[in-house]
Amino acid sequence: MNKIISIIIYAVFLFIVSISNAQTDQFNHKTGKYLVIDDANIYYEEIENIDKPTLIFLHGGFGNIEDFNPILQMFTKDYHIIGIDSRGHGKSTLGTNKLTYSRLQLDVESIIKHLELKDINIIGYSDGGVIAYRLAVAKNIPIRKIVTIGGTWCLSDAELMEKLMANMTPEEYRKAFRRSYEFHMKYNPEPNFDKFAKYLHEMWIDKTENGYPLATVQNIDVPTLIIRGNDDYMFPLESAVELTTKIINSSLLNIPFAPHGAFKKYPQIFEVIVKDFLLNHE
């Protein structure tokens, strides 16, 4: 009987450990911390892996760090993982100033300096990709490599976004991004979705130096993997190809049949290519 009880206790222990391990391989909006940057509280989470290179995840507009959970386990064993909710997104507050890509860039730089991170790799999706380009251009932090998915960069991309979003109102954004709206209202410490949507809309169509990196991408000198889905109407193939001619050490992965969130559609392709890029290509 004692032997049976011992086996049961051991099985329960293994089950609890497995659940615990599974939770540490995911962003959960429970285990993170805040960094006060100017007038906003920026939320971030760490999945610690001491002495491993850093891999920072930057999400897209209306998203949050949990968007990366379907692919996160691909990297947790080999990297020290950082996920950052961009200003106004997820559990990060908006503050009083308008959203700009330059503002989001400064927020990421502040967290990197606060945590004293080294040997940094970045995976940026959509707006997160734009921020990754700006970080690589600025050279204020030690970046090793960047991977972007659907990350736009030029004036024609901004004009396309202006055309696509021309008639969108905060109410229409609530409907189009219902899950994001519900998350924002439930978890954001200072919820104001309509103001957030308005600021995000203005950021997407910003043609100033605070917006897309534009011609400055030619100053990026770190290895760069540019990923787009072939069916991504927000990041045209022509724009992606031109970008590879601007960034000297860059490669383009155009995934067939995939939309803007190409990494979600075909995670297997994403894993093989990105892991090889991060490990082997300088």
Image: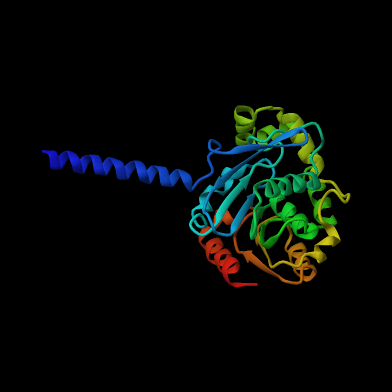
- Residue at image location 65% in from the left, 53% down from the top: 117
Residue 249 seen in the current view: yes
Furthest residue toward left: 1
The quadrant of the image that shows the C terminus is bottom right
Across and down, in percent, residue 93 comes to 70, 33
The quadrant of the image that shows the N terminus is top left
Which residue is more in the foreground, 136 or 245? 136
- Residue at image location 82% in from the left, 37% down from the top: 98
Q: Is residue 130 left or right of residue 280?
A: right
| Tally of marks | 0
Across and down, in percent, residue 30 comes to 53, 35
Residue 166 seen in the current view: no
Across and down, in percent, residue 59 comes to 65, 47
Q: Is residue 105 above or below residue 269?
A: above
Q: Picture quarter containing residue 14?
A: top left
Which residue is more in the foreground, 246 or 144? 144
Q: Is residue 159 left or right of residue 234?
A: right
Q: In this view, does 3 lie to the left or right of 274?
A: left
- Residue at image location 80% in from the left, 55% down from the top: 157
- Residue at image location 78% in from the left, 43% down from the top: 165
Across and down, in percent, residue 132 comes to 72, 55
| Colour option used | rainbow
